Image: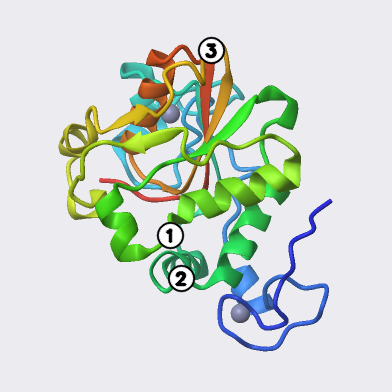
Amino acid sequence: MLDLVFPQTCPGCDSAIEDNEKLCGDCLSGITFISGLSSCARCGIPFGFYKSKNDYGDGGKNEGHLCGRCLTGSHSFSKARSIALYDGKLVDIIYGFKYRGNPGLGDFLSGLLAGGMPYGADEFDVIVPVPLHINKLRSREYNQSAVLAKNLSKSIGVKHDLFGLKKTRDTMPQFEIQKEEARRKNVRGAFSVTDPDAFSGKSVLVVDDVFTTGSTTDECARALLKAGASEVRVLTVARARWA
Ligand SMILES: [Zn+2]
Ligand SMILES: [Zn+2]
């Protein structure tokens, strides 16, 4: 049961909506939900949706198949899932949430996460957000991933640790970097746990707004596993196209 309060205007376009609606019909039809699409068992990328050679893998004909990237490389997280494709109206909504600090959009996006939660809540001990470096936190005033993690935690009844991970090194924004290898390098070793004992034997859910190559969440997972976490999974609102 969600107890989020939604505004009575559409968070995507500000047009009036009914009390029981979360988004107007136009905006809703501009969001492509991933659940139901055939996707990689590991990283969750929908097969054939984005025109990348790595996207197809072994064909994705069956449940349990892996994309080309997961067949040849490995991620630190055991699974990553996203609710919808990062295109259409969702791009505007996430932008408004991230850079314009619209809290109503945070509620809406958290509602998407909770409503489309692809894992069982009982599979996790704790939810942690991808942290921002203190320099970014100062300029942006809040960590959008922490808002999502906190709201999801409340909705599904799994505890959260908003400062469980910290970003120890400021990095270039990933969206300014084209190549996947360069993205990995950019965030390599940039995260660590705040308390070395906090995650020992714990199953952790890492929450973020957008998953692109997964380099960032992968580094978060690496830091958590290094600190003794038993498993790390990833959940993001959106899945972006990459190279
Ligand atoms: Zn709308
Ligand atoms: Zn994959």
Identify the element where label 1 is drawn: loop
Residue name at image x 82 percent, y 78 percent: 19
Identify the element where label 2 is drawn: loop
Q: Which color scheme does this rendered protein use?
A: rainbow
Residue 79 in the image: x percent, y percent?
52, 26
Residue behind mark 2: 101
Residue name at image x 56 percent, y 82 percent: 13
Residue behind mark 1: 142
Query: Which numbered disc, 3 or 2, marks the residue that appears first in the sequence?
Result: 2
**Dot 2 crowding, Cα within 10 Å, few <14, some 14–19, many 20+:** some
Compared to residue 234, the image places residue 33 above or below, namely below
Residue 86 in the image: x percent, y percent?
45, 57
Question: Alpha-carbon distance for marks 3 and 2?
Answer: 34 Å
- Name the quadrant of the C terminus: top left
For badge 2, the amino acid type reads Gly
Question: Alpha-carbon distance for marks 1 and 2?
Answer: 8 Å
Query: Which numbered disc, 3 or 1, marks the residue that appears first in the sequence?
Result: 1
Residue behind mark 3: 230
Question: Alpha-carbon distance for marks 3 and 1?
Answer: 29 Å
